[in-house]
Image: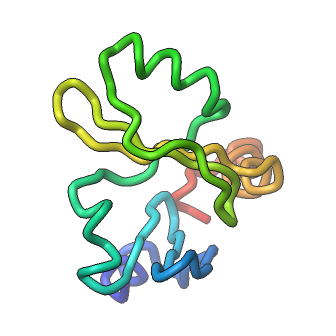
Amino acid sequence: MLTLQRLHGREPHLRFRLGEWDLAGIGDMFIVAGSDESLAPIRDSYEPVIISDLDSMQKELLAAEAVITQPIVAVPTGRMRFARHASGLHVEYIEWTDELVERFIRAPQRAGRLSSEL
């Protein structure tokens, strides 16, 4: 985390605990930390992709021959699911709450800033 703090020149703007994981957002990066055992189910996954509608994304994923590896669940930031693409890429898709979208995406965009400049 210290390396990312130095690169971004700031502290994480979002921190919370989810089960056995500690999560932090810094700039446009999201970090998940935990024991080797707790991270095993997502070890081969890539960072979260924020999307606007998890329900409609499922149709797109299935049409592209992806396999849903975790159904939609509620999380502190909104709702999420995992899917493995036909290529083998394992991705977390997350639908943020309206408040987080406004705070970390829309407001910085209106101000002409990149999310990494938060």
53 or 101: nearer the viewer: 53
**On the rendered structure, is 103 left or right of 86?**
right
Q: Is residue 25 above or below residue 89?
A: below
**On the rendered structure, is 117 left or right of 69?**
right
Q: Residue at x 53, y 69 (%)?
A: 25
Give the residue furthest to the left.
Answer: 87
Give the residue furthest to the right.
Answer: 99
Look at the image and tell me in which quarter the N terminus lies.
bottom left
Give the residue furthest to the top.
Answer: 63
**To which quarter of the image does residue 11 belong?**
bottom right
Q: Position of residue 114 (x, y in %)?
A: 56, 50
**On the rendered structure, is 100 left or right of 93?**
right
Q: Is residue 4 above or below residue 47?
A: below
96 or 81: nearer the viewer: 81
Q: Is residue 14 above or below residue 109?
A: below
Q: Position of residue 65 (x, y in %)?
A: 30, 17
**To which quarter of the image does residue 3 belong?**
bottom left
13 or 50: nearer the viewer: 50
Q: Residue at x 74, y 44 (%)?
A: 106
Q: Position of residue 117 (x, y in %)?
A: 56, 62
Q: Residue at x 27, y 80 (%)?
A: 37
Counting every numbered tag in the picture gives 0
Look at the image and tell me in which quarter the C terminus lies.
bottom right
50 or 74: nearer the viewer: 74
Q: Position of residue 98 (x, y in %)?
A: 81, 47
User: What sort of colour scheme is used for the picture?
Assistant: rainbow
